[in-house]
Amino acid sequence: MSNKKYIMTYEGVKKLEDELEYLKTVKRKEITAKIKVALSYGDLSENSEYDEAKNEQAFAEGRIVQLENMLKNANVVDESEVDEGVVSVGAVVKVKDYDFDEIVDFSIVGSAEADPMENKISNESPVGAGLIGKKVGDIVEITVPDGTSKYEIIEIRRA
């Protein structure tokens, strides 16, 4: 596993810690119970319930290792120290999206907690990287997969 540093907010760290706790306590017990039931069916060579439970166990254990690595290498951004004059991780940026002629709020977060459906965009994404370091009033053209998007920064605030 790489030792990549994960830039995260406190909220993102808490979310990962909660998921890790759930996987280690609840999910492991559920999978163990499924394996015991599947073993009671006898012959493992044609036991799809056993195979499914073992696959689920492997996925859960892999996710646990991934979460532990992310938390170990987390670089937490203190949102109270976010400079509201410049776009950075931990900031909420209100922009005018010229492509859709609408006002949008983007939360700039680390890649581990990005969720485009909630307008939480990664500092490593094209739009996030394009907005980092900009100020209110700046007009930014950002190359995205389907062309170029144009944004005007209207407001920057803490999350």
Image (cartoon, rainbow, N blue to C red):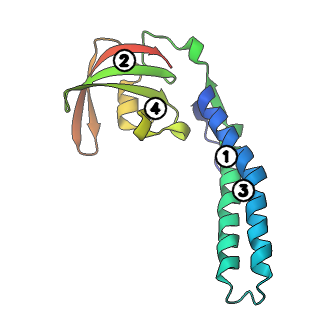
Q: CA distance from mark 4 to mark 2?
A: 13 Å
The amino acid sitting under disc 1 is Leu
The amino acid sitting under disc 4 is Asn
Q: CA distance from mark 4 to mark 1?
A: 19 Å
Circle 3 residues within 10 Å: few <14, some 14–19, many ≥20: some
Say which residue label 2 marks. 134
Q: Secondary structure at mark 3?
A: helix
User: Above or below — where is 157 with respect to 64?
Assistant: above
Q: Which one is in front in this view, the residue at disc 4 or the one at disc 1?
A: 1
Q: Secondary structure at mark 1?
A: helix
Q: Earlier in the sequence, mark 2 or mark 3?
A: 3
Q: Secondary structure at mark 4?
A: loop
Q: Earlier in the sequence, mark 4 or mark 1?
A: 1
Q: Which one is in front in this view, the residue at disc 2 or the one at disc 3?
A: 3
Taking the spot 49% from the left edge, 38% from the top edge, the residue there is 114
User: Could you tell me residue 73's position as x and y percent?
Assistant: 67, 37
Q: CA distance from mark 1 to mark 2?
A: 31 Å
Q: Is residue 26 visible?
A: yes
User: Above or below — where is 147 with respect to 79?
Assistant: below
Q: Of residues 31 and 83, which is closer to you in this image?
A: 31
Q: Are marks 3 and 1 in contact (CB under 8 Å)?
A: no
Disc assigned to residue 67: 1
Q: Earlier in the sequence, mark 1 or mark 2?
A: 1
User: Could you tell me residue 60's position as x and y percent?
Assistant: 68, 58
User: Above or below — where is 27 with respect to 151?
Assistant: below
